[in-house]
């Protein structure tokens, strides 16, 4: 897994988390975004499944704060998830918390 942060030209902060796991199709991403949605594959069948709440919770938190959650994924190649934080949610040096 690789985590990269960057600032976009508009000032928004983007955290990208990339893995080289099983990946997903667009249809599987849609399932994973739904509460309790679980994507099954040959590899995942050998592991204990989760509750299917992780992605929906992250997406709801991002949206509640004006952010976004985006995915790029290819089966058998892996997935990249981007958390895009709006400018008004980013502390700069000297900002108070």
Image (cartoon, grey):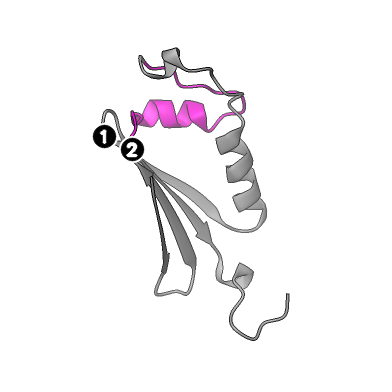
Q: Nearer the viewer, residue 2 or 89?
A: 2
For the N terminus, which image quadrant? Answer: top left
In the image, which disc is placed on residue 77? 1
Quadrant of res 49: top right
Judge left or right: residue 15 versus residue 97: left
Report the predominant secondary structure element of the magenta stretch.
loop
CB atoms at circles 2 and 1 under 8 Å apart? yes
Numbered range of the magenta stretch = 21-41
Q: Which residue is mark 2?
A: 73
How far apart are the alpha carbons under marks 2 and 1?
A: 7 Å
Judge left or right: residue 58 versus residue 28: right
Residue at image x 57%, y 57%?
Answer: 67
Residue 40 painted magenta = yes
Residue 52 painted magenta = no
- Whole-percent x, y for residue 52 in the image: 58, 26
Residue at image x 53%, y 17%?
Answer: 48
- Whole-percent x, y for residue 51 in the image: 61, 24
Q: Nearer the viewer, residue 26 or 14?
A: 14
Q: Residue furthest left?
A: 77
Residue at image x 67%, y 52%?
Answer: 64
- Whole-percent x, y for residue 84 in the image: 50, 58
For the C terminus, which image quadrant? Answer: bottom right
Quadrant of res 50: top right
Disc 1, SS: loop
Judge left or right: residue 77 versus residue 19: left
């Amino acid at each position: 897994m690789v985590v990269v942060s960057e600032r976009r030209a508009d000032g928004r902060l983007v955290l990208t988390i990339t893995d080289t796991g099983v990946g997903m199709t667009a249809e599987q991403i849609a399932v994973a975004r739904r509460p309790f949605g679980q994507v099954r594959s040959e590899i995942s069948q050998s592991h204990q499944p989760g509750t299917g709440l992780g992605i929906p919770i992250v997406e709801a938190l991002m949206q509640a704060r004006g952010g976004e959650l985006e995915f790029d994924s290819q089966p058998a190649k892996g997935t990249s998830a981007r958390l895009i934080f709006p400018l008004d949610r980013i502390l700069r040096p000297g900002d108070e918390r």
